[in-house]
Image (spheres, rainbow, N blue to C red):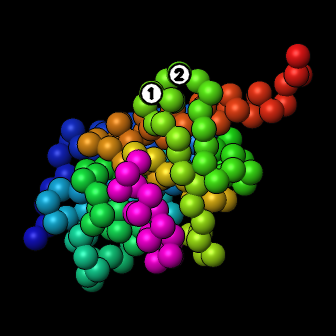
Amino acid sequence: MTMMISEELFASFRETGRDLFLTGAISSHGGNLSVRIGDRILITRSGSMLGRLTHADIVETGIDACPEDEGCSRELVVHRAIYHATDARAIVHAHTVHTIHRSLISDVIVALDSESKAILGDVPVVSAEQAIASPEAAGVLSAALREKIVAVLRTHGPFAKGATLEEAFYHVSCLEASAKILDLMDAGPRG
């Protein structure tokens, strides 16, 4: 069964991808986005530029492995595991610099700012020997996201869930702002 992506949903992909790029949350070809609709997943194409998404950059596949997987983001295995383990309807994965930096020095990102404390709480950092697109990464992230709305894969960046792409992006951007504050505190003078 193939669904047509609505203009409203395509606009959500396009705007979220553009915002990820413009905020520096991804490189030109980094990150990925997906939405679950029933037993179907719409996910960005492998190698797509999220800042310049076209209709051809959104691939439809099933919630379980199938022939339609060709062309999907290689992180499809992670997205599927998260959908199977949680009530997520959308997932945003970014390569936010400050968040990745925090993942190299902490097992949990503990916010200092009130917004991140209230919205995210403590954010777990999980590890996988193969960080990109591995079943191990899928397992540790889906386990962490059963309890949290965002988790960070050490060296690779945050995966956030939400009811919409915009909500998942908010979780990523809130975490990155918190990580910047932590980095500034670490770099600043102590008084």
Q: Residue at x 72, y 54 (%)?
A: 104
Of 162 and 148, nearer the camera is 148
User: Taking the image as drawn, is residue 13 in sight?
Assistant: no
The answer to whether residue 82 shows anywhere in this view is: yes
Kind of residue sitting beneath label 1: Ala
Circle 1 packing at 10 Å, graded few (<14), some (14-19), many (20+), is: few
Rendering coords of residue 183 (x, y %): 75, 34
Q: In the image, is residue 33 part of the stretch drawn in magenta?
A: no
Residue beneath disc 2: 114
Q: Position of residue 136 (x, y in %)?
A: 50, 76
Q: Residue at x 16, y 66 (%)?
A: 39
Quadrant containing the N terminus in the rendered view: bottom left
Q: Determine whether label 1 and label 2 are within 8 Å by CB.
A: yes
| x and y, in percent, of residue 85 in the image | 30, 64
Q: Using the image, determine if residue 178 lies above or below residue 17.
A: above
Res 22 → quadrant: top right
Residue beneath disc 1:
118
Q: Nearer the viewer, residue 181 or 80?
A: 181
Q: On the rendered structure, is 159 left or right of 29?
A: left
Q: Which residues are magenta?
A: 133-148
Measured in 3D between alpha carbons, the distance from the residue under mark 1 to the one under mark 2, in whole angstroms, is 6 Å
Q: Tell me the SS state at disc 2.
A: helix
Answer whether residue 145 is magenta in the image.
Answer: yes
Q: Main secondary structure of the magenta part?
A: helix
- The 10 Å Cα crowd at callout 2, few under 14, some 14 to 19, many 20 or more, is few
Q: What residue sits 26% from the left and 42% below the top? A: 163
Horizontally, residue 104 falls left or right of residue 178, namely: right
